[in-house]
Image (tube, rainbow, N blue to C red):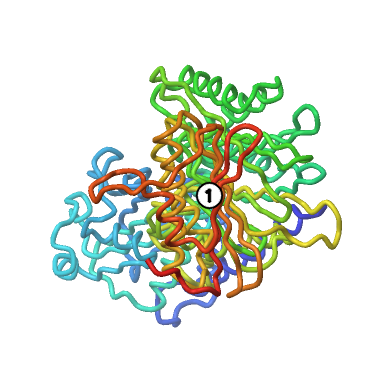
Amino acid sequence: MGGGRERRGSEEYDEVRQVEALNRMAGPVGDGSGDPSDRLRGREADLLVGHALARAETLRETLALVPRLADASLPLRSQLVLRSDRERLHCVAQLGFTDCGVDDFRVTLGSDHPAAQAVRTGRPVFLSSSDEYRTRFPVGQSCELKGHEAWAYLPLTTYGQVTGVWVAGFSAPLEMTEGARALLATVARLLGQSIERTYTDEADLALSQSLRSSMSRIGPGVDGLTVAARYVPTGGGLMVGGDWFDSLSLPNGRLGLVIGDVQGHDVHAAGLMSQLRTAIHAYAAEGHGPDAVLVRASQFLAALDEDRFATCIYIEADPATGTLRIARAGHPHPVLRLPDGTCLLKHLAGGLPLGLNLGEDDYPVNALTLNEGEVLMLCTDGLIETGGHDMYSGWLRVRNALSPGSSEDLDGMADRLLNAVVAPQEPGDHPQHASLTEDDIALLLLRRDAGEPGVAPPERRLFLTLEQDQARGLSEARMELQGLLHDWASPDQVDTAVLLTSELLGNVLVHTEQAAVLRAEISGSPEHRRLRVEVTDRSDDVPHRRAPGELSSSGRGLVLLDLLAHQWNVRPEPEGKTVWFELDEDRPDLPA
């Protein structure tokens, strides 16, 4: 309530300060010996120009007003406004550069050009003469050089990011005094404000604002499940791109969660995102399972636009049991945070991104149980890769931000993740070029709440199923077990646990026709903990110890259990069997 009035008042205050700065720096030329009334009229004229600049409704109107601040000491002849996309700068408006058309001026962001340098560093480039230009930048655009003797390249900031450059060309060499630089910087700030108002047409802006508003209204979850979400647009000047998340109320008290990323960062990507988001909501509300929702969503997107695809994860959560049924379409794997802060990258079977329409609409459903106090984190790749990170180093950064603290403050956890990824700008700092080439960020956190107050958090545990056609899942199981044991006292015991687990899982996949179910639990206090690993299958064939030959590829599993495990055994089940072993953290490894 009243937020619009407060915001408008703040903008008017900033505008007055900028106009006053223009008035101080752009007074009438001369030594002050002329008619005082002439000097007063000059300052009043400059003040009116400053107000007009701050109120200009179009970019061309703004450019037309700027020369009225020039005089003999600031011989402004021409102006260019360059917009940056993810790879290059291109002209969107010009005044006086007669040979620099919209299609003629193209500079890559990595090139040795003053405009590209201004975008990369977020700092202006001033060139006082032709000699200085040729010395510092041997290769220039001919349309910039023709008829000009000095230049200024000032980064333009819109929505808090450097999104372009204002180029001012002067007809005579110019001494770049502190006053001249300050005046040009103030004009660039006003230009940035004008671009914020006019760069995209009203329809694009309305779409962006509407989508951004809807993204901030995610539901709080249901009884037993709490949800927190964040969205940060970092690619370009739009307030929303192709990333999204959603929370859906499903029949029988279940909760649907979806996160996705449509290819691209333009208005078209935002529009497709809105349509796809609505379609998934509708398919889920009809009662379709996670796999069917993604199949229909893929066909829907392919029918809309064959040149765009989207990654996505859809979850159907049962708050009563904590069971999550998850389907994945080319999206980054989720992260499971255990109550003690341990974070595991959960490798989920998945299908192709939505919209590829390759006749392979197969999205296997993964079953995962979320225990009390555990948090599942889903994100788009912007959270992982922002700041020049790859998927591995970005995952480490996310893990280090997600692990500390308690899961009780889910919103605080979400803010901590974003703060670790999106570097805050200090007052007066210039945004860096990195923000132009990075992806939007969507973040979704789901927590299973405790059923009764005072109940102790569960043990650290791991549960997954490997089907017969998922041999690659062996390496993923090893990675998750290593994550479970990330702080184990003995690295050798970690290697032992991974080896024994691989043997048991491999034995099921090779010697039976059944799926292998892996359970791993850690109990006890630090440095005195016990690891228990169980591998269950539905085959009635009981393993036998053999004495394999030196070159034999099988028969070693039970031998290794005897040699390396502190305890192990085989437990018959009503259907099938379970082979288990234990390792104690405070006991030495058994001799081989």
- The image position of residue 228, as x and y in percent, is 69, 50
Q: Amino acid at mark 1?
A: Ile
Residue 316 relative to residue 304: left or right: right
Residue labelled with disc 1: 441
How many marks do you count on the picture?
1
Looking at the image, which is closer to me, 235 or 482? 482
Residue 354: image x %, image y %? 47, 28
Q: Quadrant of the C terminus?
A: bottom left
The structure residue drawn at horizontal position 48% and vertical position 66%, both measured from the top left corner, is 186
Say whether residue 105 is left or right of residue 281.
left
Residue found at the far right of this picture? 453
- In the rendered image, which quarter is residue 206 located in? top right
* Vertical side of 533 occupied by 184: above or below: below
Residue 56 visible (yes or no): no
Q: Nearer the viewer, residue 57 or 405?
A: 405
Residue situated in front as seen by the camera: 576 or 303: 576
Asked whether residue 443 appears in the rendered view, the answer is yes
